[in-house]
Amino acid sequence: MTLLRRVAMAVLIALAAACLTPSATADEAASYVGAQTCAGCHSAQFDAWKGSHHALAMQPAAAATVLGDFAGAQLEHFGVTTTFFRDGDRFMVRTDGPDGALHEYPIAYTFGVYPLQQYLIAMPGGRLQALGVAWDSRPKEQGGQRWFHLYPDQNLKPGDPLHWTGRDQTWNYQCADCHSTNLKKNYDLAANTYATSWSDVDVACEACHGPGSRHVAWANSAETKAHSGDSLDRMGLTNWLKPTDGGHWEMNPETGIARRIEKLVSNELQTCAACHSRRKAIAKEPMPGESFLDGYLPALLEPGIYHANGQIDGEVYEYGSFLQSRMYHFGVSCSDCHDPHSAKLRAERNALCAQCHLPTRFDVTEHHHHEPGSAGAQCVNCHMPTKNYMVVDARRDHSIRVPRPDLSVSLGTPNACTQCHVGRSAEWAAQTVAAWYPHGRQTTPHYGGALHAGRIGAVDAEQQLDRLIHDQGQPAIARASALPLLAPYVTPASEPAIKAAIADASPLVRMSAPRALPASPPPAVIQTIAPLLSDAVRAVRIEAARALAGTDLLALTPEQQTALVKATAELVAAEKVDADRPEAHLNLGLLDLRRREPAEAEAEYKTALRLDPAFVPALVNLADLDRARGMDEQGAELLRKAISIEPNSADVQHSLGLLLVRRHNYTGALDLLRRASELAPDNARYAYVYAVALNSTGASGQAMTVLDEAHRQHPADRDVLMALVSIARDTGDFATALRHARELAALDPADTRLRALVSDLENRQVH
C-alpha cells in the first residue's frame, strides 16, 4: 500500500512561556504528551504544521475531513458497483465484502489528503482496512474530483491479498506506524487480533522530536534549566534534530555550487528515513532519532524496485534514492529543501535549487539547453523526473542525478529526456546530450553497469561487482547492492572484495556482506564473517546471524559462539516484530531448518497458514519439509493445493515437477518442469533442471536447445555451462563441449578441475 510519508521536523525549538501541562523530572522515562501540549508554546510551528500533509495523514471521518463525493456517487470495477452515500452524519460505502456479496460499511477514517484520499473501514479483530477505491483530490482541470480504483487493471476478488479486505490492505501493519504518532500495533498472535493505539492520530510533533514529557519538564522548571547534562543541554528533547557539527554553507564562486564547511552531523535523515524508505522494521516500536539501521532493515537497489542504475521503479519513497545523490554526499539534508513543519518546499521552481547553485551559472540556456521558463528549463524535470504511483501520485526521484540517456542505450534504464520528448529514442537523447557536453558524464563509468551485469549474469559480472564493492568513491548503497548479486558468481578471486565489505566504514555495506556468501560457508569464511556478529549496528548483526545460522559451534571461538546466540535471538525478535504476517513465520521456519529444528520449522509454517491458508510459499516449504521426512505423498497434496491457488506460480510447478521425478513419473514431471521454465524464463535454474530432465529421457537435442537459450540469457551460469559440456561430450560433440568448457574455466581460472576438464576435451578432440 502506498503511504503519505513524513519529513522530519528539523528546527531548533523556540521557547516561550511555561507550557500548561504537568511537569516531569529529567530522570523519568520520556512519555508522549500530544501535539496540543506543544501548541501551547510553539504556536507558529503548530500553525504551520496543522495544514500539512503530516497533520492530515489520518483523520476521523467527518464533514470537515472527507473530500470525496458521498452523495450517491458510484464506480463500477470488474462488475462490482461501489456506492458512496450518507447515513445522517456517517459516511458510508456499499461494496463487495470478504464473502464477495455487497455490504454497507461506515467510513472510520480518512487517509491522506492530496493528490488522493483513501478511506479506512473498521473490520473484526481490530483491523482497519483501506478501501481499494480512492478519491482523486486534484482539481477537475487536472483530471481530479472523481472516484477511481487503485488497481484499475486487476480483477481483485475477496481472498486476494490486494483486495481491500486482504492482508496487504491492513492498516495496522502496512500504514499505521507512519501515519500516526506513538503507534503501538498490539497484535495478539494467538487470537489473530489487534488492539492498536496511538497518542496522536496523525503525524504530529513527537513523531519526529520524540516523546515530549522531558521537554515540558525542562520548560516548566527553573531548577531543571540550571542543571547540566546532555538531555538538559538539549532542552530535554528526546530527539535532537539541530546539526551538532557547527558547520554552515558557503558558495564557491568558481564552481557556482555551495559547499558545507564541516561534515554534517545530524539525526535528521535517519529520523525521516524511518518512514521515507522501503524497509522492514527489526525493532519493536523504534524511538524517533534512534539509529535507523538499529530499527530497520532497508531495501537495497534490488530488481523490481530500482532500475539497475538506481532510478526508482517500484514504490521506494526517498531514502534509498537520496543516498545515491551527490547532495547527500556533500551534506544536504531533508530540511534544506523542505520546511519541516509545513512540509512545503522552501522555495518554488528553480529558486529552490538556487539556494546552492548559482542561477547565473545553472539557470541559463547554456546549461539546460531549453527555452528559459519552459518545462525543460526546470531543474527538477531533468534531475528529479517523476513516476506515477497509485495511478495519480507523481513522485520525484530523489537521487537528483544528471540525465544519462547513454545508460538507457546500454542498460535499458529510463531517462528524463525521453520522458518529456515522447516518441524520441534513447539513442537520439544520448547523442544530443553528448553534443551539448562532449566531456560529460557519458564518458565515465556508472555503477549501474556492474549492477546490470550482476542481474543478467554477464560473463564478467564477478569482476565488475568486485570493482564496485572496492570503489569507495561510489555510493555505499550501490556497493552494498553489489554484494547479494555477487553470490551466484563468487570464486576465491572475490575474497578480497568480501573481506573489504566486512570491514567497510559504512554499516549498509557491512550489513550486505553476509549476503554474498554461499548457503553453507566453509570454515575460513565463517571466521571472516564472525566479527559482524558483534557489530555495533543491529541490522549488521542480524544479517550475519542469518548467514551463519546452523553453523557448527565448534567452528567458532567461545566468544563467537556467545555472539552468534545473541545475534540469533535478535534476528528472531526482528522477525517477530511482524508476527501478524505469514512471511515472518516463513522466515522463522527457514531459520529453524538451518538450525536443524524441523519440528519448530513445521510449527512456523503452519502458523503462517493459520494466518493465511492461501499463503503459497508456506505450502511449498512445508511440502519440501515433507520431502526431507520421506512424506512425498503428503507433500504432493500440498503442492497441488498451491497450484490451485496460484496456477501460474513457477516455483510451485517446479517443486511438484521435482516431486514427480522422485516418484518416477517422468511424463508428468517433464510437463511441470517445462511449464516452470516457461513461466519464469529469466530463471536459469529452472531451465537447467528442465534440460537435465529432458536429457535423462533421451531427448538430448531438446535439452541442448533449452540450455543454449538459457546460456544466451545467463552466460555466466556455471550449472548451465556444465550441463552443456556434459551433454555435448556424452553425445560425442567434443568441439561444442570444449567451447563451453573453456567458457567455464574462464569464469574461475584458479580452478584446477576446470583446467583439467579443458585439457581432457582438447585431447579427445585431437584423437
Image (cartoon, helix red, strand yellow):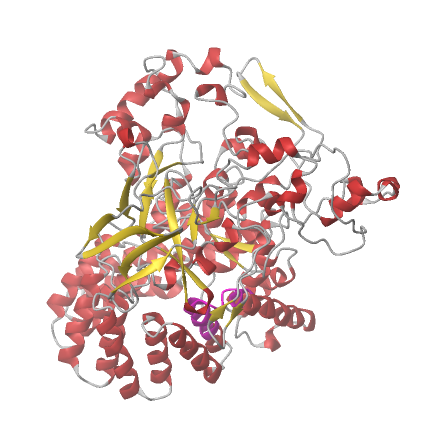
Picture coordinates of residue 27 (x, y %)?
A: 81, 54
- Whether residue 588 appears in magenta in the rendering, the answer is yes
Q: Residue 615, located in which quarter of the rendered image? A: bottom left
Indicate left or right for 174 with 220 as reference: left
User: Is residue 477 at least partly visible in the picture?
Assistant: yes
- From what the image shows, is residue 121 above or below residue 508? below
Name above or below for residue 536 compared with residue 620: above
In the image, what residue occupies the spot 66% across and 56% down? 536
Quadrant in which residue 198 is drawn: bottom right
- Residue situated in front as seen by the camera: 187 or 561: 187
Task: Tell me which corner region of the image, top left, top right, bottom left or bottom right, holds residue 31.
Answer: bottom right
* Residue 434 in the figure: left or right of residue 540: left
Q: Quadrant of the C terminus?
A: bottom left
Locate residue 154, reporting x and y percent: 23, 54
* Magenta span: 574-590
Residue 376 shown in magenta: no
x 38%, y 63%: residue = 167
Of residues 639 and 581, which is closer to you in this image?
581
Q: How far across and down, in percent of the image, does residue 548 sit? A: 54, 68
Q: Is residue 340 left or right of residue 193?
A: right
Q: Position of residue 289 (x, y in %)?
A: 63, 47
| Figure disc tally | 0
What predominant SS class does the magenta segment belong to?
helix
